Structure formats: C-alpha cells, structure tokens
Amino acid sequence: MKPQGIHLMKKLVYFIILYWLISANAGAQNRPDEALSFSLTDGREVITQDINENLLLRVIKDSSGGGWDIRVVNKPSNIHSENLLYHSVDWHGPYPSQIYAWQVVEKYFPNERQLHVRGYDYDVKISLKNTVTDGQGRNARFVSGSVYILWKRKP
C-alpha cells in the first residue's frame, strides 16, 4: 500500500474510533442509573432496592391488594420514613408514585410518570406495561401487568 493510502486508512480508523467514543458517551448519558421491575400481581409485601448510599427505593403492596405505593426514602429508614417522591411534606390524596388498579381504570394518572426525588439530584420514572384490571372503582384489582421503575441521577 502506498504511503498516502496508509495515511488515509489511519485517518479513517481515528474517525471511526472518535465516532464510537462520542456515540457511546451520548448513549450512556441517556441510560438510567438503575432499574427495578416486578409484576403487578407479585406476592411480596415489600420490595426494596438501594439507589445509592443515602437513598432506598421501597415499594409497598397495599394491604387491600389493589395496588402499590412507590417510595424513595433516606437511609436508614423504617416504614414511617418520609416519601421523597412527594413534592411536599403537606401532600394528601392520590399521587403519581402510587399505582392502584382504580387509577388505571379511571385513567387518573398516565401509565408513564416521571417524578423528582425531593432534596436530591435524582429523577424516578414509573412505567406501567400491559395492565389488565378486574372490577370498577376502589374495588378494582390488577389481573396482570408489570411495573418498571427507572432512576437516574441528573447531570
């Protein structure tokens, strides 16, 4: 191969490597830090997952069996720890961090919700997939479907 061809090949290889590095970095910035998924009919009462050294994701099944309460709490935590997904300590009533069959039936919240973790540079995205419910109103129950919870540190 002539020296000009070798020089051109080197430039092409450098360009490909540079392109790959830029693409990989852009993709990494759009990926969540972590994820958790479970069935809406999961039998566990509580599902927990560490977010980082200070935060814990806690998913609690409603005692009536009609839904789930998704919480992000400070560590160490207990059942009464403040839910940092609420935008205020004064909040009362249904909130997008709650997943209840009646909310799905009534389309009370969208099936995809993004919430900020109060006091931290984290966002949590909650997605409901393939939900099937039985019943009406507050008596509705999940028959099938999945929950996907993604969390990501804000840049």
Image (cartoon, rainbow, N blue to C red):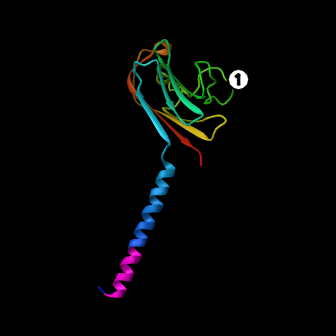
Residue ID at (36%, 86%): 4
Q: Nearer the viewer, residue 17 or 53?
A: 53
Q: Which residue is mark 1?
A: 90
- Residue 124 location, quadrant: top right
Q: Is residue 4 magenta?
A: yes
Residue at 55% over, 28% down = 97
Specify whether 151 is left or right of 11: right
Dot 1 amino acid type: Asp
Residue extending furthest right?
Answer: 90
The residue segment tinted magenta is: 2-12
Does 155 lie within the magenta span?
A: no
Predominant secondary structure, magenta span = helix
Q: Position of residue 153 (x, y in %)?
A: 57, 43
Q: Residue 120 falls in which quadrant of the image? A: top right
Q: Nearer the viewer, residue 126 or 2?
A: 2
79 is higher (above) or lower (below) than 31: above
Q: Quadrant of residue 146?
A: top left
